[in-house]
Image (cartoon, rainbow, N blue to C red):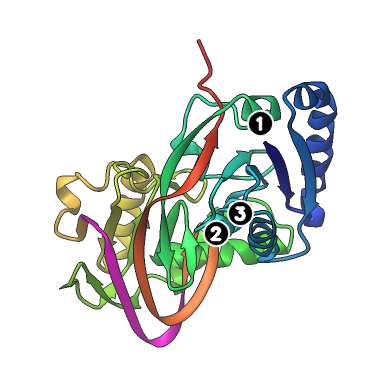
Amino acid sequence: MKYFFIVNCRPDKAAIRTEVERQLAEIQDQIEENGDSVELYLTTGEGDATRQVRLYSDLHPNEKVCFVACGGDGTVNEVASGLVGSQGKSLAVLHLHSNCDFIKYYPGRDFTSIREIVMGEEQQIDIIRINDSYSINVCDIGFPAAVADFANRFAMRGKKNVYRKGIVCAILFGRFNRIRMVADGENLGGWLLSCNLANCRYDGGEFLCSPYADNQDGLIDLCRVRPISFILFLFMMNAYAKGKHIKHPFFSKFLNYRQVRHVELYTKNMTSISLDGEQLPGTRFIIDLLPKAITLRLPEKIKN
């Protein structure tokens, strides 16, 4: 097995590389005893991780490789996107100094340890395809996509509490979105406040947006909310954070929840949707679920 570490090299992520190198030095003897090898790659910019994973997989089709995403949801998304369609290749996540909503789907596992990754287990999971891009966690439309967009802008400027700042801006500019949505052939209407298309459960660092999502069931969990008043919106946010919004009787007339396999989105004006926090602009989006498309290497569950 080769462990190929993909490290986010943004200046504010320098501590990630330092910690990866420290841990690798500690378990070097174990890796050599197992007959494994290690390679470290520092990304050069947006999309570079995807390109590198695809290139390496194409050049080494018969080599068994675990690509370890060292960063947040964006890095995990890029590595997973590069793995779609490859054989004998897997994804692992090393969670260091970054927010990662994807791993919250797997409580009770230590994603901070390279040693635990090496000793881990593999399973097949689904991934969502959006046009020619992918989402391994949650695809956001409308208000949450606006939140992610504003949060990314604040993060690039070195601000703190970027997601909460993004919420404030999106309340002012992202609550009314005209997007035609067709899910498994059914027209769900035009105006919406927000919509989550989920493969996993958590979004935005603290929100249990899709509490019933299962990334091995071959289905996308769709939760669409039509525009509501500002007061109702604030009331819903508390339930949304705790994952209680879907079955809340008060919100049933504003909310549409279902499990689907195929979704189409159309809008007259250019818009962006958020794929694991990364923005994808366009006016037409074709969305499908790819069952068991990724091999995920998980740390063993922590024993109490």
Residue located beneath label 3 in the image = 79
User: What's the amino acid at mark 2?
Assistant: Ser
The kind of secondary structure element at disc 1 is loop
User: What's the amino acid at mark 3?
Assistant: Val
Q: Is residue 37 above or below residue 179?
A: above
Dot label at residue 72: none
Residue located beneath label 1 in the image = 112
- Give the dominant element type of the magenta stretch: helix, strand or loop: strand
At label 3, counting other C-alpha atoms closer than 10 Å, the crowd grade (few under 14, some 14-19, many 20 or more) is many
The kind of secondary structure element at disc 2 is helix
User: What segment is highlighted magenta in the picture?
Assistant: 258-272
Seen in the image, is 303 located left or right of residue 246? right
Q: Is residue 143 visible?
A: no
Of the pair 304 and 209, the residue shown nearer to us: 304
Q: Position of residue 55 (x, y in %)?
A: 68, 62
* Disc nearer the start of the sequence (1/3): 3
Q: Is residue 56 above or below residue 33?
A: below
Separation of disc 1 and disc 3 at Cα? 17 Å
Snapshot quadrant of residue 19: top right
The residue lying at 83 percent from left, 36 percent from top is 21
Dot label at residue 81: 2
User: What's the amino acid at mark 1?
Assistant: Thr
The kind of secondary structure element at disc 3 is helix
Of the pair 34 and 140, the residue shown nearer to us: 34
Separation of disc 1 and disc 2 at Cα? 22 Å
